[in-house]
Amino acid sequence: MLLAEELLLLGLDPEKGTVVNSARQYVKVGLSGALVAELALDGQVELRDRRFVPSGKEQPADPLLRDVRAALASPKGRRSKDQVRRLDKAAGGVWDRVAARLVDRGVVELQPRSLFRTERYPVLDLAARAELLERVRAAAATDGQLDPRTAVVLALSGPCRLLEVVAPDRASRKQARQRIDAATALTPVAPVVKAVIADVQVAVTAAVAAAGAAAAASG
């Protein structure tokens, strides 16, 4: 399972099939970051002069990773934050492609969108999600060495607003935040994702304010 698949599975409410805490737009950014991190762990991408640059001669065997790597290769001149922000469109819809992989493997079920709601993805493979939860929660609750893949998922859980999933017990969240910070230090893409999400939050706030002003003016 790709890191992006794990991040999406972590963020889904298993029964409702929606992202917890209404954090879909943040997890969407996180998926792009997870794909870049996957390439970095495989030696296919490196952070150089504040941008992600493809490295190595062999192309990834996975078609999604291959498209992500190609998207990072061009155009030149963009900073890492811009690369991650634009990756969803450049790679043909990261959210849809990652979700489709989970559907195809029977991990989640697709309930198509309707007039009144977006599509939903109830979890079918509860054992896979339970294993993921156990691994990430153990990493958040202890001070042992983090394996690289778990570190990525843990690092991205913070900006993706999944702290309550990682640490459901309120008393354990201080420790979990410290571990997320430690994981972020091991994962160069995590601060980039956090910065992009901060931009998203600003945009959402501005849009809500504009809608409220328009409603007040029309009233």
Image (cartoon, rainbow, N blue to C red):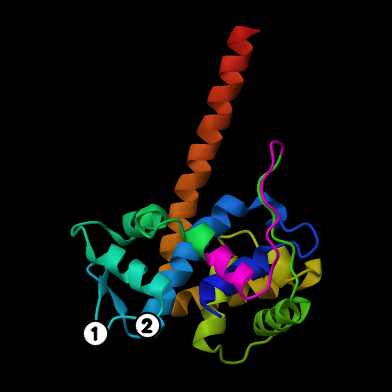
Which residue does the image show at 56% across and 88% down from the upper left? 146
208 relative to 28, above or below: above
Q: Which mark is residue 56?
A: 1
Quadrant in the picture for residue 143: bottom right
Which residue range is magenta in the image? 98-116
Residue 45 in the image: x percent, y percent?
Answer: 31, 77
Q: Is residue 179 above or below residue 90?
A: below
Q: Amino acid at mark 2?
A: Ala
Alpha-carbon distance for marks 2 and 1? Answer: 13 Å
Q: Residues within 10 Å of mark 1 (few under 14, many from 20)?
A: few
At 57% from the left edge and 82% from the top edge, which residue is drawn? 150
Point out the residue furthest to the left here. 76
Q: Residue at x 22, y 68 (%)?
A: 49
Check disc 1 and report its element: helix, strand or loop. Answer: loop
Residue 198, image x and y in percent? 48, 50
Q: Tell me the number on the disc at residue 61.
A: 2
Q: Quadrant of residue 99?
A: bottom right
